Image (cartoon, rainbow, N blue to C red):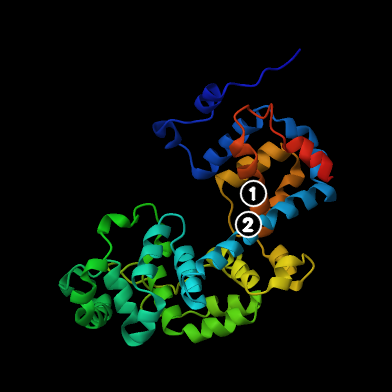
Amino acid sequence: MVTLPIPLSIRLCSTSLSREASANFSAAQNRTATSRRCASIPRRCHKFSTQTCHSPGLGVVRRHSKICPRNACSACWTQQRNFVRDETLFQEIASALGYKENKLPFTLLAQRLPLRLLRENVRDCEALLFGGAGFLHTHDLDVYKKSAREYVRQLWDGWWPHRDELQRFILPANTWRLSSTRPLNHPQRRLAALGILARDWSRLQRASGKNSVAAANDLFRALEHPFWNFHYTLTAAPSAKKMALIGESRIADILANVLFPFWLAHDVAAAASPSTPLWAEYAKLPAQLSNRRLETAATRLFGNDSRRKDFLKTVAHQQGLLQIYEDFCMQDNSDCAQCPFPEQMANWM
């Protein structure tokens, strides 16, 4: 008996939950439900899951894992036709600090207030960023907590002399997405981290110049701010516990999507040879977070094999899975019936 592929329209209906229904479940329960629904979808590559979970299949994922940094490396070279090296790095770090919710406003802000301008006004660079972001919309200190008033006054003192000149560059309030952001990841905290990096840019230059994960980790973990180490936002009450400005997951993201491609863009030998220490460092970078696309890709490729978890442990494997998912799963409209990935995988193995 031949099992016909499930039509795309039916699959979309069967794999989607209404907003009212999904609200009754936790994020973990929704991920589990999605994973189980995806497992029921016919997959021609599923029969290869046993072989893929062995070392030959691991090489397939590793091969695709190098596409992401190489593509980003090419993007770095393209950008450097128009920007100097430091401006490129500054904009990419700003974009990474914005994460997915606020990537656009951080990128716009780094373009409108470039590193050169911030370095020329190094004492006021943090104030320029907050003013340009539109976070200094009122100078009435009464709206702030007592613990924040002195800091906000300092920001206003630094922003006021530049306000008229930079008025047209201020981002509209609706550019920011604040409601879906975790307190620790609030863009105001990330903006403060960007200001520290701009003010002490020479430290980042030295750390990035070493092409070392350890040096970059030490730099980002050592970022300190007397106000933002204990506040979520400008208007929030102080926290009793000290908080890191940039968390481990964000550091891993900056390494994978900014610094490694940047290093490859300036080390032609490392980019061409997969046996260089730089690629070895990239392969060892541990994954901090997963997401629904990764879970879906792992489920569709490996089914319920317990070893599929091994492909979610490192950033390299995660990026390899995402690359496969985008190159094949997202391009296929036949419910896997005509996807060329199984045949290609058989040839690679």
* Percent coordinates x, y for residue 130 in the rendering: 30, 72
Look at 36% across and 71% down and name the residue there.
231
Mark 2 lies on a secondary structure that is helix
Where on the picture, by quarter, is residue 273? Answer: bottom right
Picture layout, residue 9 above or below residue 139: above
Task: Pick the quarter of the image with the N terminus.
Answer: top right
Asked whether residue 96 appears in the rendered view, the answer is: yes
- Spatial CA span between label 2 and label 1: 7 Å
**What mark, if any, has residue 323 been given in the picture?**
1
> Is 182 in front, or is 343?
343
Q: Amino acid at mark 2?
A: Cys
Whether residue 214 sits left or right of residue 27 in the image: it is right
Where on the picture, by quarter, is residue 256? Answer: bottom right
The local crowd at label 1, few if under 14, some if 14 to 19, many if 20 or more residues have their Cα within 10 Å, is many
In terms of sequence position, does the residue under pointer 2 or pointer 1 come before the other?
2
Picture layout, residue 325 above or below residue 131: above
The local crowd at label 2, few if under 14, some if 14 to 19, many if 20 or more residues have their Cα within 10 Å, is some
Where on the picture, by quarter, is residue 158? Answer: bottom left
Whether residue 92 sits left or right of residue 71 in the image: it is left
Q: Check disc 2 and report the residue beneath it.
A: 68
> Is 219 in front, or is 172?
172
Asked whether residue 229 appears in the rendered view, the answer is: no
Q: Amino acid at mark 1?
A: Gln
Whether residue 323 sits left or right of residue 201 in the image: it is right
* Percent coordinates x, y for residue 111 in the rendering: 38, 68
**2 and 1 marks in contact (CB < 8 Å):** yes
